[in-house]
Amino acid sequence: MEKIIIQGGKKLEGKIKISGSKNASLPIIAASILIEGRIILKNIPKIKDVEVMLKILEYLGAEVEHNDNELIINSKNISYKDLLIDEVKKLRASILFLGPMLAKFKKIKIFFPGGDLIGARSIDPHLKALESLGCKFNIYNQTIEGYFDKLINQVVMLKEISVTASENLIMASVLFKKPINLRLIALEPHVQTLCSFLRLAGYNIKGTGSHFLTVKKGERLKKEISFKIPPDEIETATFLSLGLATKSNITITNNKISNLDALIITLKEMGANFEIKRNDIITKPSKLKGTKIQTGLYPKLLSDFHPPLGVLATQAEGFTLIHEWLYENRFGYLRELEIMGANVDILDPHRAIISGPTPLLGKEIKALDIRSGAALIIAGAIANGTSVIYEAQVIDRGYENIVERLKKIGLDIKKISN
C-alpha cells in the first residue's frame, strides 16, 4: 500500500505535458490480437492498467517490448488460452478481450473483470450485443464462457450506448466478410481512436464519429503498423482544475483541444480564466462561481471529468450542482472533501450540491478510485497544512508518474510505500 503526502497552500508554476490516453490505449492493446504481426504504439502511457493488459496479452503468447512511451507488440504467435488468470480480475478493461477473442478464436472463457468501485457497470450490454451477432454465453462462478456459432444478424443494435460494449462489438465484427451494421455506437474519442487503429490495420470501418458504423474485413490486412496514441483528455481536466484551484500560472502542453468542448464550456461558466494557444492551455488566477456540472455521453461532459471539477467547485462562490448521470457510487470523494472542510450535500446517488468557497484543511483521507485519488491530490494542493492520501497506489492505474510530474511544477508532494 502507498500513501501520498502533500504540503498544500502553495502556488505552482511551469509546464506539465499530457500523457497518452489510458482509455484509448487499453482497447487498442486488446485489438492487437486481431493483427498477425508487429504493432508499434507510440505515446503509450506508463501506467498500471497498461501493464496488466500487457501481461494478459503475453499470457496469450504475444511478445512485448516496452521502452519509455513506445510499445512494440508482436502478435504473430498468439494462441487461444482460457483467461482464468488473476490479472483479469484487476481491472475493468479486461472485458475488452471478449470481442477480439471471439472474433479470432470463436470462443472465450474469462473471469469477470475487476476495476474501480464507482457503481454498477453491467456486462449485460456486451453480452446482448454479441449474442445478436451469433455468440452464445454461459455465466457461472464469476466466469464468462462464450463461443461463436454462426452469424445470425448483419444489423446489431446496442441495448444502451456503452463505450466498452461499443468497442467489444466493433472488434468482434471486423473479421466478417459480410458488412455488419452497428447501431447506437458510443462517440467517445477513444472509440473513434480504436476505429482509426483498425482501419490503419486494413479493416473496413465506415461512419466513425457517428452512432452508426458499417464494419467488415478488409481486402488486405497489414502485418505491421505504427500508431500514435492521442493525448489523455482526463489528464487535461485534472491539471486544468489543479492550476485553477491553486490560482497558479501553469502551462499544460500536448492537449487535444477538439475533445474538450464540454469541459471548456463548463469552466467558462465557472468564470475560469485560461488561455488556449494551439495545443497548450495556460491557467490564470480566477474568480470562480458556482454552476451546474452535468455529465453525460460524449460530446457531453465526461463522467471522469467531474471529480477534479468537484474539488474546483469548493473554491467557487455560490452553489454548484453536480449531476452524475452514469455512476451511482462516484460521490465517495465528496465525503473525503467533507473531512477536509468542504460544504457538501449529497442529495441522492446521482446529485450533490457544493457550497463555496470554503477553505480546505490538510487531513488524512483515502483514494477510492483513480479519479477520486487525483481529485484529492488537487484538494491537498489547495489545503492548509498536511494532507495524507491513503490507498494512493490506485492513482498509478491511470496517471503516469504523477508525483514526479507535479513536483516539477512546484507541488510539495511525495509518495511513501508501506
Image (tube, rainbow, N blue to C red):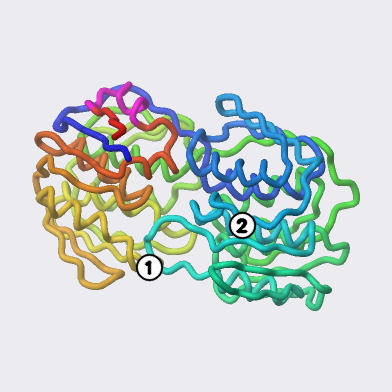
For residue 302, which numbered disc appears in the image? none
Image quarter of the C terminus: top left
Give residue 47's position: percent from left, percent from top.
48, 37
Residue receiving disc 1: 325
Q: Is residue 228 magenta?
A: no
Q: What is the magenta range? A: 403-412
Q: Residue at x 31, y 46 (%)?
A: 373
Give amino acid for label 1: Trp
Q: Indicate whether 200 appears above or below 8.
A: below
Q: Residue at x 52, y 41 (%)?
A: 21
Q: Is residue 410 magenta?
A: yes
Q: Is residue 70 left or right of residue 367?
A: right
Q: Nearer the viewer, residue 159 or 366?
A: 366
For residue 84, which numbered disc appears in the image? 2
Q: Indicate whether 392 appears above or below 341.
A: above
Q: Is residue 56 left or right of residue 278?
A: right
Image quarter of the N terminus: top left
